[in-house]
Amino acid sequence: MYLAARRARGITLIELLMTLAVTAILASIAVPAFGTLVHRGQTHSSRNELTAALNGARLAAVSRPANVVVCPTRDEQYCGRTTEWQHGWLVFVDADADGERDTSEEIVSLGQPQPAGVTILSSAGRLRVKYHSDGTSPGSNLTLTVCDRGGFDRPTSIVINNAGRLRTGPATPAAATACERAADQPHA
């Protein structure tokens, strides 16, 4: 009876090691899946932030009424001449309708740099979105493709048409390839 009571008070080293081994195996299975979930969340969040900025810019153009431009930026002051938007974007009132921000033109909002690994690439024809006071965005359709370096999520596109409306959907194979290629390049 003395031995049974003594054994019931604790656990043996072998039991502890077995518990740790099972925990380690379960953790090694769960951690990669959690990483994939985090990357997918970052990609979805980036796409949603950009969509909200574009919708907000169109609303600002109609409600002011004024020309409003959305463009990629690195310095949060001026438009960059690039198709890469993951470093941030700038929404501003374009009072002189030249598509470039002057120091006197009001900044409506700023998009922050996106998490490492997320790439946002626009089609080569249009480096910015210009909304007129009637909400239109004349020019060719602009496609912004959102992808991640790890390929954790399928690339998606945001397409802005000439009427200023946007839609989201899966990226075309060509846009997906271009975005993934840009994601693999080192960025400064």
Image (spheres, rainbow, N blue to C red):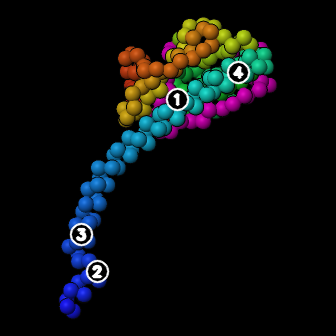
Tell me which numbered mark, 2 or 3, is placed earlier along the sequence.
Answer: 2
Which image quadrant for residue 117?
top left
Q: Which mark is residue 47?
A: 1
Residue lying at 26% horizontally and 66% vertically, measured from the top left? 19
Query: Could you say whether the residue bearing mark 2 is in a helix, strand or loop?
Result: loop
Q: Is residue 24 visible?
A: yes
Q: Residue 38 vs residue 107: left or right? A: left
Tell me which numbered mark, 4 or 2, is placed earlier along the sequence.
Answer: 2
Amino acid type of the residue that numbered disc 3 sits on in the rendered structure: Leu
**Are the two marked residues, 1 and 4, in contact with CB atoms closer than 8 angstroms?**
no
**Residue under label 3:** 17
- Extreme bottom residue here? 2
**Residue under label 4:** 59
Q: CA distance from mark 1 to mark 3?
A: 45 Å
Q: CA distance from mark 2 to mark 3?
A: 14 Å
**Are the two marked residues, 4 and 2, in contact with CB atoms closer than 8 angstroms?**
no
Residue lying at 41% horizontally and 41% vertically, measured from the top left? 37
Q: Residue 131 vs residue 116: left or right? A: right
Q: Which residues are magenta?
A: 95-124
Residue lying at 62% horizontally and 32% vertically, measured from the top left? 111
Tell me which numbered mark, 2 or 1, is placed earlier along the sequence.
Answer: 2
